[in-house]
Image (cartoon, grey):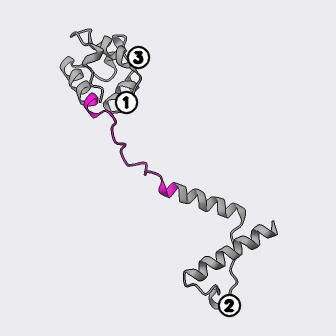
Amino acid sequence: MRKVLLLSLAAAAFAAASAGFSGLAPRGRTLRTRGRGQAARAARRSRRARQTPAHAAPIPQFPHRASWLGERLLERGWSNSDPSNHRGPDRKTIERILRGGAVRNDVLEKLAHALSAKHNVSVLDIPQD
């Protein structure tokens, strides 16, 4: 434990010296090192700062599919929950598709089946980008 502490203090002193810091604390105070808990909390705060903010909207992976589905729902006068009434995907999955999110192929097949209730739609009609 002492070796690790001494090595980390030496590394900190070298980094401070190379940055132009004299290593002396202001007004005669002694420098305090972080404890194990403090270092872990600082690392978590640093990781959180690098993450995407919660208010940032994700970039849609399938924008053409989202607009296509929105147009099909408008043509039929359907809400997001109506495809599930025709043995299609549930409301949350429809919302994911409308946001441009990725879904499995079997979900696209269910969507095509549900949309075929009023007009004939094939899985091949659904945009794949």
Q: Which residues are magenta?
A: 48-66
> Amino acid type of disc 1?
Arg
Residue ID for mark 1 = 96
| Image point (33%, 33%), residue name | 100
Q: Which of the two discs, 3 and 2, sits closer to the camera?
A: 3
Q: Which residue is mark 2?
A: 28
Mark sitting earlier along the chain (1/3):
1
Separation of disc 3 and disc 2 at Cα?
Answer: 70 Å
Q: Residue at x 67, y 64 (%)?
A: 38
Q: Looking at the image, is mark 1 or mark 3 nearer the viewer?
A: 3
Judge whether 48 appears above or below 21 on screen.
Answer: above
Where residue 32 appears, as percent x and y from the top left, is: 69, 76
Secondary structure beneath dot 2 equals: helix
- The Cα atoms of the two marked residues, 1 and 3, are separated by 15 Å
Q: Which residue is mark 3?
A: 106
Residue 106 against residue 8 in the figure, above or below? above
The stretch drawn in magenta includes residue 57? yes
x and y, in percent, of residue 21 in the image: 58, 84
Q: Secondary structure at mark 3?
A: helix
Mark 3: amino acid: Asp
